[in-house]
Amino acid sequence: MKNEYIPYPVEITDVKRESFDVQTFKIKFKEPRMQNSFKYKQGQFAELSVLGAGEAPISITSSPSRKGFLEFTIRDTGGVVTRAVSNLKKGDIFHIRGPYGNSFPYEEVKGKNLYFITGGIGLAPLRSLINLVMDNRDDFGHVKILYGAKTPDELCFKEELELWKKIPDTEVWLTVDKPCNGWGCTVGVVTELWKETHINPANAVAFVCGPPIMIKFAMDKLLESGFKEDDLYTTLERYMKCGLGKCGHCNIGEKFICVDGPVFPYKELKKYPHYENVF
Ligand SMILES: Cc1cc2nc3c(=O)[nH]c(=O)nc-3n(C[C@H](O)[C@H](O)[C@H](O)COP(=O)(O)OP(=O)(O)OC[C@H]3O[C@@H](n4cnc5c(N)ncnc54)[C@H](O)[C@@H]3O)c2cc1C
Ligand code: FES
């Protein structure tokens, strides 16, 4: 019988530094058969482990449309697991089990205009969906990515931000709290971008991912701009252990974020008691 708690070894094939404390790890499974059997969807996560350190839930940031590898973007918080992974190099091994959780809607939003509102490392889970959309660009309307970080250095996926800008009918708007010399974009929190670009709710869906305070203010702005609650999606993070809906560590109300989330329609979140505190 398959033991769901047993993780599989993966080898790091590339490491990319995104900022002073964030790196993206490209990996392949040590067992080649796992490469095909590990099927995941945009927005899902894996339990990632380093032997002797522990396990942590980490979003799969690569797109399911790009085969033969997986990518994880990890912030070294000084926590046990993220610190241990951050010290690994190309050729080193860590372990993963999964994929877990639900996913961002994809088929359901075909034909719509898409807004991605994100901050800091919050772009990591959204990047999986963004690149899936980019790989099937004709299936969607206009795409706008609004992305904020504390400083220009802390913007992740800088090369991809440049690539996305060049894709027809796609806009990327950037803002930082503290600019450096030569910063040519907006200064301020991500909602400052509302002053720069027109936000049109017609036939549109918005995905919001980032620090809790950013999610709250971005949701308020989207609703003010005329978006319906049905058309807003976000992700929640909670301390997790099993990732399988068994240990009860990650509940909000009667839901477990590891199986019922991490992606939630805003409308559903509003049904939970004390929903204002979930961000
Ligand atoms: C669905 C989901 C997806 C996620 N995706 C990502 C992702 O893509 N990338 C990513 O980087 N993270 C992601 N996270 C967050 C990540 O799982 C957590 O940050 C996790 O706790 C990291 O594990 P850790 O062992 O490194 O840190 P932990 O040891 O759990 O520590 C977490 C935080 O607490 C602090 N801390 C720990 N011990 C102490 C102490 N004694 N006193 C004070 N502070 C302390 C640490 O400094 C750290 O900031 C995700 C979480 C979820 C739920
Ligand atoms: S992490 Fe165990 S129930 Fe969600």
Image (tube, grey):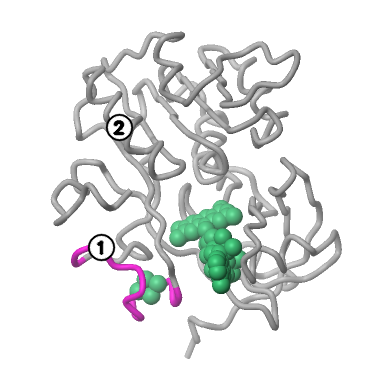
Would you say 44 lies left or right of 167 here? left
Tell me the number on the disc at residue 252: 1
**Is residue 77 depicted above or below 50 in this figure?**
above
Foreground residue, 18 or 164?
A: 18
Most common SS among magenta residues: loop
Q: Secondary structure at mark 1?
A: strand
Using the rendered view, name the quadrant where residue 184 is placed: top right
Name the spot of residue 261 as percent of width and height, x first.
34, 57
Q: Is residue 42 visible?
A: yes
Using the rendered view, name the quadrant where residue 252 is placed: bottom left
Name the spot of residue 95 as percent of width and height, x first.
66, 73
Foreground residue, 178 or 142?
A: 178
- The magenta segment is 241-254
Q: Which amino acid does the dot numbered 2 rest on?
A: Met
Q: Is mark 2 within 8 Å of ligand 1?
A: no
Which residue is identified by label 2?
A: 219
Sooner in the amino-acid sequence: mark 1 or mark 2 = 2
Residue at 79% x, 51% y: name it: 15
